[in-house]
Image: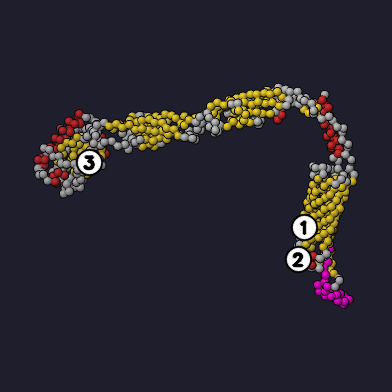
């Protein structure tokens, strides 16, 4: 019942207010006018003063029709003995902003005409038709009158003095006229400025209705009831809960704690926030920051009460975690390789409160790392040591987050197997300018070399042909090496059948590459003396066991399969 009475009172008050806001219908304005003319003739810009009046009819609270009449005059423009009078007659719409009770701004656009007269003193003698001469400067003046288009656009401000009187401190309009240009004889638009001030007198309209009788002042209580303003509202219970987002923080982060309240209006309540029992804030919401706080769990509590509400409380917890730099493990696959081989690297890291962990990078204590692959090709071992050698390489993986860097290590065993040396056999010797392999040479190839090849069926035979500088043809060294290769690969007659893929051929010619002469029992077979030229007419014979390395003196060797060895058959 109380709510119905209050609503009925509000409706009556609204109707009464609307009736009181009716405006008068008819108004007349009288006032002073000042115009600043921007002339388009030979005459500079000038000012004129005068007066004007308006007839105003209000169609409603906002739209009015206006008729504007006025005239301004200047008796001596810039001391040029030139005077002018301009009378305007305009009409158009006006928009009034009746938002305030005493002040009413308005805006209007008016269209119509202007009647302008201009007179000037005679500057030269004038002879009338009757023969009478009028001297310059006489009291007679030349006068010109014209009628043109005019408009204004602008606005002003009316201040209420009483119900029927308004004072206008300012009316400001853009004033456009279209009058003849004395210099060109044509019509020109002149852009002028008009200022006015005066009083408006209003007639008609209804008197404001008397205000309704005063109603008892009441107030609304949180439970929805209405009581007299001086009466106390009944207190009611509040249901309160807290929600923290997020509930776990890293150093530097913050959580927003929001209270959910039912049974009371939030704006009518008082708030008391505490952290671990210490009062810290009294706003409706609370932001818990981790800056300056140690890692651990914190209890956030809120107590809420009000003049008409019983006290309610709630609490929640927020945990601050400590920062932990990235930690993890590194792996190498395989973890044991031979010198010159590669190993794939990987690592996994975990951290806390550091943000995203970047992809790991790798470093090696020896050898090289490209991306996530270790290469042992550049590692150094003792070249004078012919036994197995082993080195342990430490691989360090690094991963960074937004606050720090973590590392992890693993190892790779790099093994360099023992060097198997090549076996040197006696040289195959040749007569001067001859590439024929004699019987002594065949004995070395077919007997001594055969014994090594049969014991190691995957070993490699290396034949290096030489010649002396006084021999011809130029490719004699290569022919000697090819003939020796045919003896051990032809596979027919007395020749051996060693696969050509196991035979390497080189022909440095007169270059000996530091390999000494090894004639053994064959020197007499070529009837040679111990001269340097005799030492050069030879083919070095080497047998490289499986897993061994070619002699360092052998340069630019080729497999017999790539040479014309087959076409030679079994040399006789």
In the picture, measured across the screen, residue 259 lies left or right of residue 217, that is: left
- Which residue is identified by label 1? 192
SS at badge 3? loop
- Which residue is identified by label 2? 42
- Residue displayed at 88% across by 36% down: 210
- Which residue is identified by label 3? 553
Q: Quadrant of the C terminus?
A: top left
Image coordinates for residue 332, horizontal then vertical, percent: 38, 30
Tag 3 and tag 1, C-beta contact below 8 Å: no
- Residue displayed at 86% across by 41% down: 22
- Residue displayed at 84% across by 30% down: 215
SS at badge 2? loop
In-front residue for pair 374/295: 295
Q: How is the image coloured?
A: secondary structure
Q: In the rendered structure, which disc, 2 or 1, sits on the residue that comes first in sequence? A: 2
Mark in front: 3 vs 2 = 2
Image coordinates for residue 59, horizontal then vertical, percent: 85, 44
Residue 91 counted in the magenta span: no
Give the alpha-carbon distance from disc 3 to disc 2, as whole Å. 112 Å
Q: List the single residue furthest toward the bottom.
A: 131
Residue 463 sits in quarter: top left
- The answer to whether one can see residue 383 in this image is yes
Q: Which residues are magenta?
A: 117-137
Count of numbered marks: 3
Q: Quadrant of the N terminus?
A: top right
Q: In the rendered structure, which disc, 3 or 1, sits on the residue that comes first in sequence? A: 1
Residue 128 counted in the magenta span: yes
- Residue displayed at 50% across by 29% down: 322
SS at badge 1? strand
């Amino acid at each position: 019942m109380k709510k119905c009475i209050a609503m009925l009172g509000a409706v009556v008050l609204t109707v009464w207010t609307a009736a009181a806001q009716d405006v008068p219908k008819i108004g007349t304005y009288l006032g002073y006018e000042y115009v600043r003319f921007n002339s388009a003739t030979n005459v500079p810009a000038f000012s004129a003063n005068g007066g004007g009046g308006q007839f105003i009819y209000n169609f409603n609270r906002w739209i009015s029709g206006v008729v504007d009449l006025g005239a301004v005059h200047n008796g001596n423009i810039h001391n040029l003995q030139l005077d002018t009078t301009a009378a305007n007659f305009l009409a158009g719409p006006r928009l009034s902003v009746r938002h305030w009770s005493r002040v009413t701004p308005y805006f209007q656009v008016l269209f119509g005409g202007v009647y302008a007269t201009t007179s000037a003193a005679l500057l030269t003698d004038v002879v009338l038709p009757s023969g009478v001469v009028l001297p310059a400067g006489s009291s007679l003046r030349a006068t010109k009158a014209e009628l043109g288009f005019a408009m204004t656009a602008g606005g002003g401000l009316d201040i209420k003095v009483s119900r029927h009187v308004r004072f206008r401190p300012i009316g400001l309009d853009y004033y456009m006229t279209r009058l003849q240009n004395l210099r060109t004889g044509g019509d020109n638009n002149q852009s002028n400025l008009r200022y006015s001030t005066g009083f408006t007198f209003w007639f008609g309209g209804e008197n404001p209705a008397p205000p309704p009788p005063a109603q008892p002042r009441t107030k609304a209580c949180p439970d929805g009831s209405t009581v007299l303003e001086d009466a106390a509202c009944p207190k009611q219970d509040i249901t309160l809960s807290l929600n923290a987002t997020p509930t776990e923080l890293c150093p530097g982060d913050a959580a927003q704690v929001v209270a959910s309240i039912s049974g009371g209006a939030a704006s009518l309540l008082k708030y008391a926030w505490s952290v671990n029992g210490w009062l810290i804030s009294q706003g409706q919401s609370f932001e818990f920051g981790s800056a300056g706080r140690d890692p651990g769990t914190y209890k956030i509590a809120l107590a809420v009460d009000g003049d008409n509400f019983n006290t309610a409380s709630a609490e929640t917890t927020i945990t601050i975690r400590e920062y932990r730099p990235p930690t993890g493990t590194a792996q190498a696959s395989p973890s044991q390789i031979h010198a010159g081989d590669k190993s794939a690297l990987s690592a996994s890291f975990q951290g806390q409160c550091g943000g995203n962990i970047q992809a790991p990078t790798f470093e090696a204590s020896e050898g090289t790392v490209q991306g996530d692959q270790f290469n042992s090709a550049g590692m150094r071992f003792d070249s004078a040591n012919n036994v197995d050698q082993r080195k342990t390489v430490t691989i360090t993986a690094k991963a960074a987050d937004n606050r720090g860097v973590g590392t992890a290590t693993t190892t790779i065993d790099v093994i360099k197997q023992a060097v198997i040396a090549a076996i040197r056999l006696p040289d195959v010797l040749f007569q001067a300018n001859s590439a024929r392999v004699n019987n002594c040479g065949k004995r070395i190839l077919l007997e001594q070399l055969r014994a090594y090849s049969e014991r190691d069926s995957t070993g490699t035979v290396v034949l290096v042909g030489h010649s002396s500088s006084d021999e011809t043809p130029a490719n004699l060294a290569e022919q000697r090496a090819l003939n020796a290769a045919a003896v051990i690969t032809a596979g027919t007659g007395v020749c051996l059948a060693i696969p050509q893929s196991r035979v390497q051929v080189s022909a440095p010619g007169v270059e000996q590459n530091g390999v000494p002469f090894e004639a053994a029992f064959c020197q007499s077979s070529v009837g040679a003396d111990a001269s340097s030229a005799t030492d050069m007419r030879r083919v070095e014979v080497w047998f490289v066991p499986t897993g061994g390395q070619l002699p360092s003196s052998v340069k630019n060797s080729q497999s017999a399969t790539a040479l014309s060895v087959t076409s030679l058959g079994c040399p006789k």
